[in-house]
Image: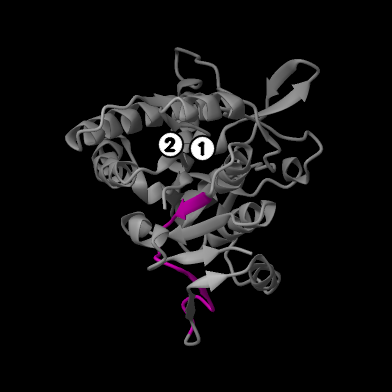
């Protein structure tokens, strides 16, 4: 059955740097093109953790040179990352589609996402960005007053506020493009965080979790399925323990119980499961799938991955 799908790409689909990204998106685009060739309507979202950190650090370093470049607010860094990641994705996807004999436009849309200035995340920043650092590197940055945290056993990273997404400002444009037969790359890095001040949208110094933003977008455009791509084929409980168990299906209620039991790592699997639950609960018949990029096609067919539905 053909589906309207929001496909949320994880960091492993983009690589860790400019060269890696250009190589990684070629493989990613081929997988996406295969899904489009099967008739599915796709909207593609993506993360930007390493990229937005790199942009922010580069301008921060430039501010200390003779050029005295301004340190850019995080909202602008997110916008820059949307542009250059979208550029690579849309070019790679256009080529892959043409190789499949499909002539469709691929559009990267600069996307704003409304957040609440009273969100407690602004008081307690906990979203990791940028590259992984050693303990020694982290110690030096901490001494300079920079906020860092250990990220799921993989190293230390900078942290910024990550408020909950409330509204995708450009959702109607995404839906219109989709219904016109276009393929849209949108909500990159979770979208540019903005706070509504009357008719004005003010950028916020934060980043938004791309999986939670993808769940809001999927609801807004009437998607049938949200696919969250990650580094594992399925969700596990008791991860990396002798009692580890991989899950084929979950109801939202079961997932919430596992969340309450602290089964999923913050900054890693937890927001993915939370996003999947939010979408699956939003309307009867909606499904969320968590799996590997290479297994997306099989997951849609119900052959692998973890499927969350009512």
From the top left corner, tell me how far across and down residue 213 is, in percent. 60, 42
| Residue tagged 2 | 51
Query: How far is mark 1 from mark 2, CA to CA?
Result: 9 Å
Residue 2 or residue 263, whichever sits in front = 2
From the top left corner, tell me how far across and down residue 8 is, in percent. 47, 46
**Looking at the rendering, in which quadrant would you find the C terminus?**
bottom right
**Is residue 231 visible in the rendered structure shown here?**
no
Q: Which mark is residue 189?
A: 1
Residue 277 or residue 244, whichever sits in front = 277
Residue 213 or residue 125, whichever sits in front = 213
- Residue at image x 33%, y 46%? 35
**Is residue 117 visible in the rendered structure shown here?**
yes
Q: Decide whether residue 228 is among the magenta residues.
A: yes
Q: Decide whether residue 107 is among the magenta residues.
A: no
Tell which tag, 1 or 2, sits nearer the viewer.
1
Whether pointer 1 and pointer 2 mark residues with C-beta atoms closer than 8 Å, the reply is yes
What kind of element bears circle 2?
helix
Residue 264, above or below 19? below
- Residue at image x 45%, y 13%? 66
User: Are there few (<14), some (14-19), or many (20+) residues within 10 Å of tag 2?
Assistant: many
- Residue at image x 31%, y 56%? 294
Residue 234, above or below 72? below
């Amino acid at each position: 059955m053909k589906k309207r799908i929001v496909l949320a790409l994880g960091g492993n689909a983009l690589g860790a740097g400019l060269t890696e990204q250009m190589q990684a998106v070629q493989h990613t685009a081929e997988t996406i093109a295969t899904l489009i060739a099967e008739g599915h309507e796709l909207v593609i979202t993506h993360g930007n953790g390493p990229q937005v950190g790199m942009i922010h650090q580069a301008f921060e370093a430039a501010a200390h040179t003779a050029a005295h470049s301004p340190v850019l607010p995080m909202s602008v860094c997110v916008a820059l990352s949307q542009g250059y990641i979208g550029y690579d994705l849309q070019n790679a996807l256009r080529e892959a589609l043409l190789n499949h004999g499909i002539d469709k436009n691929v559009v990267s849309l600069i996307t704003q996402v409304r957040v609440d200035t009273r969100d407690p995340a602004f008081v307690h920043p906990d979203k990791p960005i940028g590259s992984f650092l050693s303990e020694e590197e982290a110690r030096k940055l901490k001494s300079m007053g920079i906020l860092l945290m250990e990220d799921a056993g993989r190293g230390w990273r900078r942290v910024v506020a990550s408020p909950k997404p409330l509204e995708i400002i450009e959702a109607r444009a995404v839906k219109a493009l989709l219904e016109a037969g276009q393929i849209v790359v949108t909500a990159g890095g979770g979208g540019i965080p903005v706070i509504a001040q009357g008719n004005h949208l003010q950028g916020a110094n934060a980043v938004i979790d791309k999986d939670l933003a993808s769940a809001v977008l999927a609801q807004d455009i009437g998607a049938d399925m949200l696919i969250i791509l990650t580094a594992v084929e399925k969700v596990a409980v008791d991860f990396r323990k002798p009692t580890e168990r991989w899950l084929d299906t979950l109801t939202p209620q079961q997932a919430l119980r596992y969340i309450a039991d602290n089964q999923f790592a913050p900054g890693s699997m937890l927001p993915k499961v939370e996003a999947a639950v939010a979408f699956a609960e939003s309307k009867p018949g909606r499904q969320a799938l968590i799996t590997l990029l290479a297994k997306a096609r099989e997951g849609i067919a119900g052959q692998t991955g973890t499927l969350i539905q009512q």
